[in-house]
Amino acid sequence: MKLLIVGGVAGGASAATRARRLSEAAEIILFERGPDVSFANCGLPYHVGGVISDRDKLLVTTPERLRERFRLDVRTRNSVEAIDRQRKVVRVTDHATGNTYEESYDKLILAPGAAPIRPPLPGIDLPGVETLRNLQDVDRIKAAVDRGIQQVVVVGAGFIGLELVENFVHRGVATTVVELSDQILPPLDKEIVTPLRMLLEERGVTLHLGDSAIAVESVPEGLKVYLKSGLILMAQLVILGVGVRPENQLAVDAGLEIGPRGGIRVTDQMQTTDPDIYAVGDAVEIRDAVTGVPTQVPLAGPANRQGRIAADQIFGRDTRYRGTQGTAILGLFGKTVAMTGQSEKSLRRANRPFRKVYIHPAHHAGYYPGAEGMTLKLLFDPDTGQILGAQGVGGAGVDKRIDLLAMAIQARMTVEDLEEAELSYAPQYGSAKDPINMLGFVAGGLRRGDHPQIDLEDALAQSYASGLLLIDVRTAAEFGQGHLPGAVNIPVDELRDRLAELSRDRDLAVYCQVGQRGYLATRILLQSGYRVRNIGGGYRTYLLWRDSQ
Amino acid sequence: MKLLIVGGVAGGASAATRARRLSEAAEIILFERGPDVSFANCGLPYHVGGVISDRDKLLVTTPERLRERFRLDVRTRNSVEAIDRQRKVVRVTDHATGNTYEESYDKLILAPGAAPIRPPLPGIDLPGVETLRNLQDVDRIKAAVDRGIQQVVVVGAGFIGLELVENFVHRGVATTVVELSDQILPPLDKEIVTPLRMLLEERGVTLHLGDSAIAVESVPEGLKVYLKSGLILMAQLVILGVGVRPENQLAVDAGLEIGPRGGIRVTDQMQTTDPDIYAVGDAVEIRDAVTGVPTQVPLAGPANRQGRIAADQIFGRDTRYRGTQGTAILGLFGKTVAMTGQSEKSLRRANRPFRKVYIHPAHHAGYYPGAEGMTLKLLFDPDTGQILGAQGVGGAGVDKRIDLLAMAIQARMTVEDLEEAELSYAPQYGSAKDPINMLGFVAGGLRRGDHPQIDLEDALAQSYASGLLLIDVRTAAEFGQGHLPGAVNIPVDELRDRLAELSRDRDLAVYCQVGQRGYLATRILLQSGYRVRNIGGGYRTYLLWRDSQ
């Protein structure tokens, strides 16, 4: 067996080492265009900020280690330029010598990754306009910061862009972010990322949402960035973080099937339309694990798993890729935002029926010092209760809850299963009713009809349009500090005695701070013959929504 | 509907508030023998240490709040003394007045909890010999520490005992622990709790394992504690933390069925053998969620869920209790130990076939500063791959991984499912191959036969008894710092070139530091025709095992 692998980072390196473990006899050649293999992509922004000061720490392994330990024929600075599927050979350029040569294969794995998008704008190729993909990029960016540049413009408020923003702020560089969408982190829902948007602003980052760069110009002071809105920004460094595009040219030229978003089409065994060619990682089209719809999600974990699976198939192990959930996380100035599965906006786009609930719990028992707050949003199928997606934002413990929900999605669990989850409880770690259980209670109550709920947006709209009465069941003091427009105040503890104030002919919506008193008020009113729903997540959800407008 | 509930803490309070949510019309009387309802049991030790300085924070709710908000008839300092099932009445003593009265019921929920065991030893009832169950207990214990006592003896190294130990140490009290078992935290496996045992010793705690108190005597300096070993300990305070016993007297007297371990027998709807009487919480016999075997597990989370379920049944919602996994966690001097599902020792006791794997990962990417180490142990069914139990010990992130495995157990997931888990990855939170994935890889490789493994104990035994050759595949430097008795050193990077040194007639076991190089060495040797297994968890597991002997 002669196995060639194109690309030596996450998916390619995983495939190569897995292949060697499965076969000592195979000839395995790993081609990597750059000088490094298997580096820590996800750590690159933190080298700029000096959080990871030792550059060598970013090298997960080295060509030497792969040669010595795995007897891989590692060829860095070697580009595979073309595939001849009939002859089963690839054409390679060795950048050290400039020579071109052919290499034959029995099986070929493509792991070329995805390239940062460089929109075709005037000035986009000027020095100082950077993307971040590899160690050479990070060296240039870090050198600019080390030189003492004053201003940076980051185009694109995605994960990598914002990680860089944090590190620029740490280094004292005035940072401006330009984002085409009307929110940061477009894969997430807007209200969930709003606390981070506000945090960025608190940290002095200038945000231009709903705007885009249309040109860059070199001037003596550095770079002038022209925005669509007419604004002009000065910077000495411009980062393009507007997304990535699958590196599919090899596959396209070889006539392999490509999906509509540019990803190489593969089976769940990572096989392309040529049975001798596999493809893995950011370059391939994957199936969404929740909806089954083909899509494109560049993530390190899935790339590694796919590399394993391709090697498994080639050496006779029948493992299958189950699809990608899109589990992702971002740390920003000590806060965390994370998601897994579908977002509300992706469900709306797909016209898929769903319901949502919000909770605002502490990450551990409130009576133990140091409890940090978070907001969790759960999306589920109203008919089956299946969990479709989740998002969280806050302090400590967000990663744990989103990972638990990622696990629940993988296991096709329902919201009722969350009610029964038995998680570890001591006051430093959680609560006797963990946030995961609480999500289950709220969503389960909705499904059973015991706890009818109305989404905040609908409550506000119906309050204006069709006379829905909003009742704030918090205390008068809480009400006085701020409430929903048009709401009346009847504290839950007085509600039973004040039912006479409410007409049974009118639709009611109640709310409290986070949803719990509103739930009790809903139960009281329902049982007294009112048409009533609780506004999910209460006033805290309203504040998120209001701040995101 | 007239509903009586006996016991107002976790299970009883949950049942009462749930019942009110389901029925505004029901008459609900909550009897609580003590002065408080719904206090934070799990926080009590931290009030002693001053970590939770405000005593009121331990009151999750108050009788007044329950009356006002939930219209419950809360009767604290009222003991239910007897049940007359024929007449459907209970006899109650009001301790404020000393009066006895009867109260009738349509449905009755028993939530009496479990009482700390006070073994019948001479001096066990002396002042200063305390158990910890409620706020009155904690007041006395804290008062003793505030008085400036010098020495405390804690009998029993279970969860509550050790939480108290930490708090005594914080307060500067010389602390001695006496534990009948040969390890601390007997529900866990010995090697897993060994790092905590060593940590206790580092913090100056004196441990007497495999010993027990046989008498306490009052002397002018305080209390003399006589141990079975002949040792005599001086203290001014003795804590008994030797376990709890279900408070089943009411149920026994009423002729309800009781399990062999004293728990009130209930259906999965929490119904006792009298269809009008339900029981929940620490007093009931539950079913182990993994094995289905009846058992007794006192935990707050399950008690709350059971309370909900009893109320659900009474008011026409058919939810069912799925059994208890025994998910538990302990924080001790900044370290964490946690478990879920079956332990190795419980599987051995039950004669249930299982395999185990160990890994020793960092809690997040090693290239990002601050990564803390942990040890995870996974127990699974070798035939089906079903996860049976897990334990973890270490720094940050242990709670997350054990909770993920608790979720996996609930969902009846297999080790192969763990390989495919898609968890959130940024370098502050995890790794592209999370410890959960790694557990899956190691256990899955074992099941597929690609990665034959031998347990450390078996490898050591067979090395002595039947000539199994132990090969240390770490570097010479690592080998020089310590290795398994009798092992020879062949670094993995030299192994392919030194195969001639090894006979194919002899059984081999390889190991490295944590298992990864050993895995590669196993693959190399297997494919070269050797009979070889990898020692799971490597030298790090050996150190745990050795230190636990």
Image (cartoon, coloured by chain):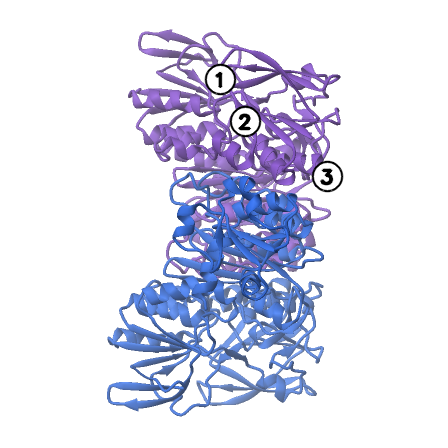
Chain colours: A blue, B purple
Q: Which residue is under mark 2?
A: B74
The answer to whether marks 1 and 2 sit on the same chain is yes
Mark in the foreground, 1 or 2? 2
Please tell me the numbered disc located at residue B212: 1
Q: Nearer the viewer, residue B31 or B218?
A: B31
Please tell me the numbered disc located at residue B316: 3
Please give the chain letter of the residue carrying mark 3: B
Please give the chain letter of the residue carrying mark 1: B
Query: The residue under label 1 is which amino acid type?
Result: Ser
Q: Earlier in the sequence, mark 1 or mark 2?
A: 2
**Mark 2 touching mark 3, by CB under 8 A?**
no
Near mark 2 (Cα within 10 A), the count class, few <14, some 14-19 or many ≥20, is many
Tell me if I can see residue A394 in this picture: yes
Question: Seen in the image, is B90 located left or right of residue A199?
Answer: right
The answer to whether marks 1 and 3 sit on the same chain is yes
Q: Position of residue B150 (x, y in %)?
A: 30, 20
Q: Position of residue A301 (x, y in %)?
A: 55, 64
